[in-house]
Amino acid sequence: MQPNSQQALDLLIDAVRIPSPSGHETEVAVFLAERMTALGFDSHIDNAGNVIGEIGDQAGPQVVLLGHMDTISTLLPTTLTDSQIAGRGTADATGSLCCFICAAAAFHDAPVRFIVIGAVEEETTSRGAWALRGTYDPAIVFIGEPSGSDGITIGYKGRIGGRISHHTSQGHAAGPQDNASVAAVRYWSKIVQYCEDRSQDTRLFDRPEATVTRMAGDAASAEIDFDIRIPEGFDISAFLTFTSEQAVGGNLRLDEATKAVRTPRSCLPVRALSASIRAAHLKPKIKIKSGTCDMNVVREFWSAPAVAYGPGDSRLDHTIDEHLSFAEYLTAIDVLRDALSRVIDELCPQSEITDATSKKGSHYGTLVR
């Protein structure tokens, strides 16, 4: 069932109104499963808590549309005007997930199996994405993250995150040995220098960037929490060897070591989205981002080309001003639906599918408004 514009807006508004901080996605998962079932999907919630809706030919090539249901823990009230919705998840990334559902809903009779997934805990551990290992074998992957209705994100930096800690009994400032805080800072300085030595390229995406996110300590005990955004080709093993060698008297604990990803501009999802964005009288914008998302995770076990697409401005992610324009949301649904038709044309060139609502030369038409 292809939703009209009001039904698409209702899905977005109702989903955003359900609080879904990481680890607490059950209510919104149940809601989305019910809505997808009503739209003709085969829907269920898996053992990890991910909501999954499948539509199209069960034996056809798989196209995964992976979004996430969770938000950061700092919630916001949901407010509406005639032109937009404000609230947590509107941009990051309930808007993108609802866009995926509405776009894929038109393809009940497609020769492709579209699999829409709302993953849990993307904002924290990416547990939902990791749980997908071994479950599907997609030909193409779309990741639900805000790129703008005219944007296509083809790359994300990787991340190494963790904590440096030092503890010592030599706590006197005039003592012969470094106290804990001094030792921790010296250790961190070596890590920063290691990254700077590998920052010869002037492009931000191709440089490792080391940032302190928290510092605490005194002469006897000190901790530094850090975040290093790493480019393609960064040798994580060599970095860990270096940090181990330099951790004299200290301790390094990692909470994440994720590789960077970048998809070629020539791949099918980029070409399909670019053509559909132009068909909507917009100019495609190819983007690479310094953050990470579930695209980094699934590239560890899916070799399919992956891009991120979704309505909204990623600069609003995690801010108190997070909001989404209704017009952009509806435009993104139109663009993605047309792109999925183009994907079908290339994956299944011999198929002949018609639809009474088609307004273009492709299998399915624009959003009924």
Image (spheres, rainbow, N blue to C red):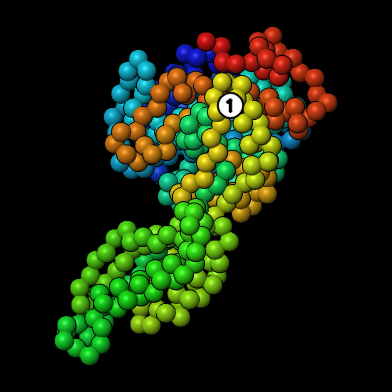
Q: What kind of element bears circle 1?
A: helix
For the point 34% across and 33% down, the residue is 322
Residue type, label 1 = Ile
- Comparing 225 with 108, the one in front is 225
In this rendering, the answer to whether 36 lies above or below 360 is below
Residue displayed at 54% across by 24% down? 282
Residue 129 location (% of width, % of height): 54, 46
Quadrant where the image shows the N terminus: top right
Please determine whether, in this image, residue 207 is positioned above or below residue 84. Answer: below
Q: How dense is the environment of label 1, judged by Cα within 10 Å: few (below 14), some, or many (20 and up)?
A: many
Residue 316's image quarter? Answer: top left
Q: Residue at horizontal 68%, vertical 49%?
A: 303
Camera sees residue 43:
no
- The image shows residue 56 at horizontal and vertical percentages of 69, 26
Residue lying farthest to the right in this orientation: 350
Q: Quadrant of residue 87?
A: top left
- Residue 267, how many percent across, how many down? 68, 40
Q: In which quadrant of the rendered view does residue 217 lie?
A: bottom left
Q: From the viewer's perspective, is 276 left or right of 226? A: right
Name the residue located 53 percent from the left edge and 66 percent from the top edge: 236
Residue 251: x and y, percent? 38, 75
Q: Is residue 368 left or right of residue 316?
A: right
Is 255 or 325 nearer to us in this picture?
A: 325
From the viewer's perspective, tell me whether residue 307 is left or right of residue 170.
Answer: right
State the residue in front, 72 or 365. 365
To which residue does mark 1 refer?
277
